[in-house]
Image: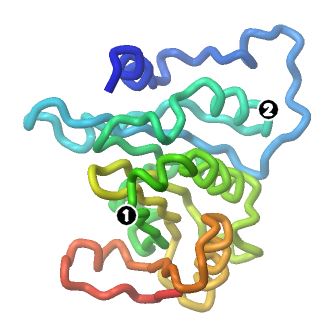
Amino acid sequence: MSEELATQTEALSLENKETILTTKEDFTAKHPLNNKWTLWYTKPQVNKSENWHDLLKPVITFSSVEEFWGIYNSIPPANQLPMKSDYHLFKEGIKPEWEDEQNAKGGKWQYSFGNRREINATINDLWLRGLLSIIGETIEDDEDEVNGIVLNIRKQVIKIGIWTKDCDETKLKTVGERLKKVLKLAEEQRVEFTSHDASNDKNAKPQIVL
């Protein structure tokens, strides 16, 4: 990871709230979103004394299309994030943690891109498509199941997951089907839904596979 990138990712903090949008005195948001969203960042662990809560930090909250683009264009793209880091975009008031009461009874749809070299060229576009489907609420109809979206950067794989409120299969299929389209997956490429409870068990099987 370059020194410049390290500086960029380390600086992802609510303490630095200014974007090109907030510095324009006459700026007025013309396209408000239905919900407010908070971007979170998990930095790589530097030493073993750091726990999950030390690594996970809120970056900024936004409520309009214009604010989203200002933030998106000001942070490192997906293919430049350091190993073992994550982006999380969740509705305001929901932490990207299993223990959060709005996540506790839910789970996640997830797809893992196993070929790092191949996916590195397209991950920025796929991640952006995922973000837009979340804030634009096109990832579902009226189910109101989706809490957020997560990007995991790992040595062997890159994962994109959609977190949901509960595990009701009748409400979840639409989300899974649309996630496949958002990620431009072929029919034979499978997305899997696993409850957060089951995620603690390495031998647990996915609840739904599409």
Residue in the image at 78% along x and 46% along y = 33
| Colour option used | rainbow
Q: Which residue is more in the foreground, 83 or 49?
A: 83
Q: Is residue 69 left or right of residue 122?
A: right
Residue named by callout 2: 66
Q: Of all residues shown, which one is farthest toward the left?
A: 48
Using the numbered discs, state the Cα–Cα distance from disc 2 to disc 1 in whole angstroms: 33 Å
Point out the image quarter for the N terminus: top left
N-term mark: 2 or 1: 2
The label shown at residue 190 is none
**Residues at marks 2 and 1 touching, judged by CB atoms closer than 8 Å:** no
Residue 52, quarter of the rendered image: top left
Residue 146, quarter of the rendered image: bottom right
Number of other residues with Cα within 10 Å of mark 1, as a class: few under 14, some 14 to 19, many 20 or more = some
Numbered disc 2: secondary structure? helix
Q: Depth-wise, is mark 2 or mark 1 nearer the camera?
A: 1
Residue named by callout 1: 114
Q: Which residue is more in the foreground, 80 or 59?
A: 80
Residue in the image at 76% along x and 75% along y = 142
Q: Amino acid at mark 1?
A: Gly
Q: Position of residue 162 (x, y in %)?
A: 52, 64
Q: Amino acid at mark 2?
A: Glu
Q: Position of residue 73 (x, y in %)?
A: 65, 28
- Give above or below for 20 relative to 102: above
